[in-house]
Amino acid sequence: MLHNNKKSISSSIFKIINILFMIILILITVLPILNTFTLSFSTDIDSMVPGVKIWPSRFSTEGYNTLFQQVKILRPFLNNIIVTVCGTILHVGLCSLTGYALSKKMAGKKIIMGFILITMMIPLQNIMIPLYILYKNLHLIDKLITIIISGIVSGYSIVLLKNFFESIPESIGEAAYIDGASQLKMFIRIYLPLAKPGIATVALFQFVGRWNHFMEAVLFINDPKKYTLQIALKGLVIDSDASSSATIITKNTQMAGVMIAIIPLLILYPFLQKYFISGLMVGSTKG
């Protein structure tokens, strides 16, 4: 009986510690976003007052008005949408086709998989200079297509989707093949719908990564008309703080820019969450 009491007390203490730890993590995550939201809807003067705010003392859209009228954030925002949507669609499409092909029996499959796994060990930082030289020789500098095709396929996405296609029973594909379906028809009508969790996982990773891309835009884009959102935010938040120009960009305008960058991700994630979690589970258990 005493042993059970001790076990119950230790279990309760463990639960309390876990709850406190989770509360701390939530506060660490939520407070910066809440402070950013509050500052973005504050007046110019209120936003310059030091301290963490969780609600605007005076609600105002001055920051957003300045952001769109003076800073002209709309063009970088649209450029970001083009790069993100086109890049994500192409990435998912190409990696799906490659993963589907590698999920079938084929000659040299192990060698191809070996090359794909090798590419996963090479970070972008190590090939930035060769990439820049290649794109420059192809006259692709200062073009949005350069950011779109950069990372258009990845070993991780191919392996993840390959595992999904391999988890689909072969009998389904064999039945469709007997009925006269071609490989392309089977891929589009049978395998893609059944691999929704994997496709959603890859799409979410790609959308977030491309929406927040920074290094590629800094490296390949010099024309201000081709700037994407993250480059514009760098100029808005960092460069304006370091500038001695007479034009002052207040905190509410800076935080409005940050909120514009965050909102699409916050809207997208809830719709893909269930696919994202199941996709990670299958991708981590299949080999």
Image (cartoon, rainbow, N blue to C red):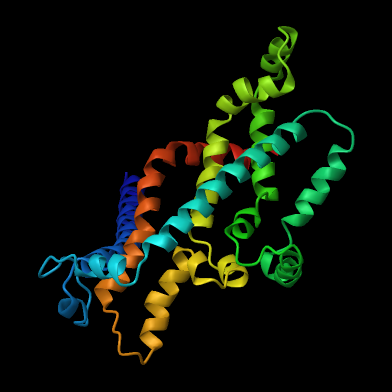
- Viewer-closest of 213 and 62: 62
Viewport quadrant of the C terminus: top right
Q: Would residue 103 appear left or right of 74 to someone viewing this image?
A: right
Residue 269 location, x and y as percent?
Answer: 40, 46
Write down the quadrant of residue 173 in the picture.
Answer: top right
Q: Nearer the viewer, residue 59 or 101?
A: 59
State the residue at coordinates (57%, 73%): 222
Residue 189, compared with residue 157, is above or below; it is above
The residue under the point 70% across, 49% down is: 155
Q: Can residue 267 be seen from the camera position used here?
A: yes
Whether residue 140 sits left or right of residue 64 in the image: it is: right
Apparent side of residue 163 relative to residue 241 in the rendered image (left or right): right
Residue at the extreme top = 179
Q: What residue sits 38% from the left and 77% below the top? A: 237
Q: Going by the picture, which residue comes out furthest to the right?
A: 107
Question: Where's residue 240, x and y in %?
Answer: 37, 82
Q: Quadrant of residue 65?
A: bottom left
